[in-house]
Image (spheres, helix red, strand yellow):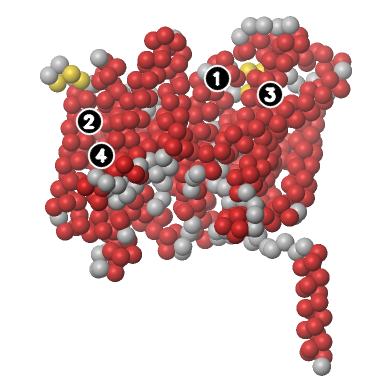
Amino acid sequence: MAVLEGAVVYSNLLVLLSIGLTITYITTGIPNFAQGSMAVFGSYFSLTLWRILGVHPYYSLPLSFIFGGAIGVGIYALILKPMIRKEATVVMLMIATLSIDIIFIGILGAYSETLSSITRMATTKFIFTPMDFKLLGIEAVLVISSFMIFLLLLALFLLLYRTKFGIALRASMENPTLAEIMGVNVEHTRLFSWFLSGSLAAVAGSMLPFRQEIEPLTGTIIIVSIFAASVVGGLSSIYGALAGGYIIGMSESLVTFYLSTFLGSGILVYSKVVSLIVLVIALIIAPMGIAGLSIWRNKKWSRYTSS
Amino acid sequence: MEPVYFFLDVVLWFSIYLIVVLSLNVEYGYAGIPNFGRAMAVLIGAITVGYVMNHILMLLLGIDGEIVEASGIVKSTMNTMISHNPLLGMCILVLSLLLAAFIGAMAGILFILPSAKLKNEYLSIALLAMSEVLYQVSNYNTSIIGGYYGVSVPNVLAWIPGEWRIMYVTLLSFGTALIVYLFVDKILTSPYGRLLKAMRENEDVVRAFGKDILVLRMKTAALGSSIAALAGALYSFYSMNVIASTFFRVEWTFFPFLMVLLGGRGNNKGVALGVLFFVLTKVSLTIYKFEIRSILQLPFEATWLEYILFGMVMLMILYYKPDGLIKEKPVITPPIKQALKEKNIKETKNIGS
């Protein structure tokens, strides 16, 4: 049961991260290799508030949301937008996000060592699990991360289908040129998507220490799972990212756990191999992900999934 | 640090990075394959030395046991044997390099296969993920190359006194890098090199001329990965051990990309210049690491500063100088040279008349 709970928490966080990655890919066409490190920024943000001001990580979630959003907007407005203006190729933009990732790793490493010299506590590796409590007999992180997903989906649904901005957003996701002709400011929707991507990453990062140990390089490890989840989802629809996050999160934790029951605990280090295999299979069988499978074409709601 | 050692350090790192960067230039610079998994081929070269070669030697010497301890015994036994018989060391070195090139080529072919159906973005994601997974598995699993303990590698130059070793290793690496450079330059100025550039610019045109894109990509990945594996093997013989954590993505994928773009993609001379600039900066930073830390009163290690610095430099290059220091020039083949000459003669005649 504890394994299942852990798997659900992990999948929830993966969904937040892969929705963020997918939404920036839809609007700007750039796979963001810095998504993992953006999440770790959230982890260190919560750690700082906890160590210095004594704020419990759950209470710092709203602040983390804003902090992450600012980072996302910063990446887009200061680095990627000028490059897009100069008509950089997609590969160039991907290398730019790789560079951002390296800069983030450097900042996180430097910051973690600075923080430990200020607080006189080791912060290069940390975990929040001892601070978690029980809500109705289950771990609070499970309840809160599931609630976050619910809240996010509700907010996204209301925004996308009930407001004028949402219509503009969907229009510029499906056909930016046409949307621009119709008077939609595509730049606003791109900025918004980067804000959302950064803030979701930071919120996921703030909750990640409840589930696994965090160090400055954690981002480089979880990026494999994030990409696997997004690519399985097709990188083209938010629902795809949602499904992909649960598929990858569940298979990564449950498959390795199941294998470890009769192959020994040594198999647990291969959890990322599982998501890699799912990624490669997804790429070979359905290069456009599950959202791109032709079986959805006949369904009525396919017009919402920009396939 | 004495100037001699500074010089040797620069030459050594220049040689090793030049090999990796040339391999990336073949794949990314010429063929346009965004191989974000370069570190994987380098790691495969190191695994060839740390796992395959150590196992061969264990078999020959009749040593068994866990690789971490057994490789230590192999090392000390081999070192005594090599110190009496220099030729044996050379044999091991050459055999390992050939083996690394072969395994690297096989791995390159295998991992480029998904590209048959993938766009550039998806391919680069797949390659990065594969590289990251191999890194993590060899870092956590102690039975491949000892995980975080690492494995020992015999000193192939055991017959040389300790203080001279670094000089010979540097010479050896530089020699290998020079051979690789001449080889790559030769092969890329052939029609094959121009075919790769054509593929980079427009795959449909290449297909229309009857070339199979996948076969071309497989050949290129085999060539690139086998060269990169050489660097991994060479680095392992230099450091006399193999530890998975030294083959981190930043060092062996990101920095090579930085050097290719700094020098100018698709241009071997420019790329070599890029490597030189990078290595000079990196070696200076490594040497003055502690001075930098104490002067700036940093509460953290200077390595992190290095990451931030090189990341910034990369963004600057991408924004201000995407063509690099030396811009790629069209290859002047003999027929083109002839055509240019005739054109010039005609023009001068026209001016004369």
**What's the distance in space between the residues labelled 1 and 4, CA to CA?**
35 Å
- Report the mark closest to the observer, 4 or 3: 3
From the image, tell me which residue sits under label 3: B49
Do marks 2 and 4 both belong to one polypeptide chain? yes
From the image, tell me which residue sits under label 2: A145
Q: Position of residue B134 (x, y in %)?
A: 53, 28
**Chain letter for the residue marked with disc 4 in the picture:** A
Q: Position of residue A158 (x, y in %)?
A: 15, 48
Q: The disc labelled 2 sits on which kind of residue? A: Ser
Instruction: Name the one closer to the observer, B217 or B288.
Output: B217
Give the answer, above or below, for where A244 lies relative to B275.
above
**Is residue B262 something one can see in this rendering?**
no
Q: The disc labelled 1 sits on which kind of residue? A: Gly
Question: Is label 2 in a helix, a strand or a loop?
Answer: helix
- Taking the spot 25% from the left edge, 20% from the top edge, the residue there is A5
Quarter of the rendering containing residue B163: top right
- Taking the spot 45% from the left edge, 33% from the top edge, the residue there is A281
Q: Position of residue B79 (x, y in %)?
A: 78, 15
**What's the distance in space between the residues labelled 3 and 2, CA to CA?**
46 Å
- Report the mark closest to the observer, 2 or 4: 2
The quadrant the N terminus of chain A occupies is top left
Q: Which of marks 2 and 4 is nearer the N terminus?
A: 4
- Taking the spot 39% from the left edge, 44% from the top edge, the residue there is A288
Asked if the residues shown at circle 1 and circle 4 are in contact, with their CB atoms under 8 angstroms apart, the answer is no
Instruction: Name the one closer to the observer, B302 or A82.
Output: A82
